[in-house]
Amino acid sequence: MLLGGVEVEHTTVLRLSSVVKQPPLSRKLSVAWTLRSPVLNLTVAERQTILALLDDEPDGLEGLRDRLLLSPAWQLGERL
């Protein structure tokens, strides 16, 4: 699946949905996983929420923040 332009495993999206505390974003991730969506577009605010969550590297998501920040789309979200 492409998560905001970055290739990730579908199970990564499921894990994110379980640790995100904002219901709209958590639901969006969960639905994308359930439907096995090939692409999940995210707003800058959603990207910032995910990056903030990944600061503490929750179990099963180690190294994801670094991978996401390699993408220019995620770097934009980091600069805002």
Image (cartoon, rainbow, N blue to C red):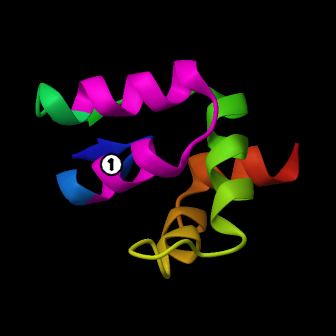
Q: Amino acid at mark 1?
A: Val
Q: Is residue 26 magenta?
A: yes
- In the displayed structure, would residue 4 be above or below residue 51? above
Residue at point 46%, 76% (across, down): 59
Image location (x, y in percent) of residue 47: 63, 41
Image location (x, y in percent) of residue 68: 52, 63
Spot the residue most to the bottom.
Answer: 63
Image location (x, y in percent) of residue 61: 44, 71
Q: Is residue 31 magenta?
A: yes
Res 41 visible: no
Q: Which residue is mark 1?
A: 13
Displayed quadrant of residue 35:
top left
Magenta range: 12-32
Residue at point 50%, 81% (across, down): 63
Displayed quadrant of residue 39:
top left
Residue at point 48%, 71% (across, down): 64
Image location (x, y in percent) of residue 23: 56, 23
Q: Count all numbered tags in the image, as a single digit.
A: 1
The reply, left or right, for residue 29 in relation to residue 65 is left
Spot the residue most to the top.
Answer: 24
The secondary element bearing badge 1 is classed as helix
What predominant SS class does the magenta segment belong to?
helix
Displayed quadrant of residue 28:
top left
The reply, left or right, for residue 50 in relation to residue 38 is right
Spot the residue most to the left.
Answer: 36
Quarter of the image with the C terminus in it: top right
- In the displayed structure, would residue 10 be above or below residue 49? below
Residue at point 60%, 65% (across, down): 69
- In the displayed structure, would residue 35 be above or below residue 56? above
Res 63 visible: yes
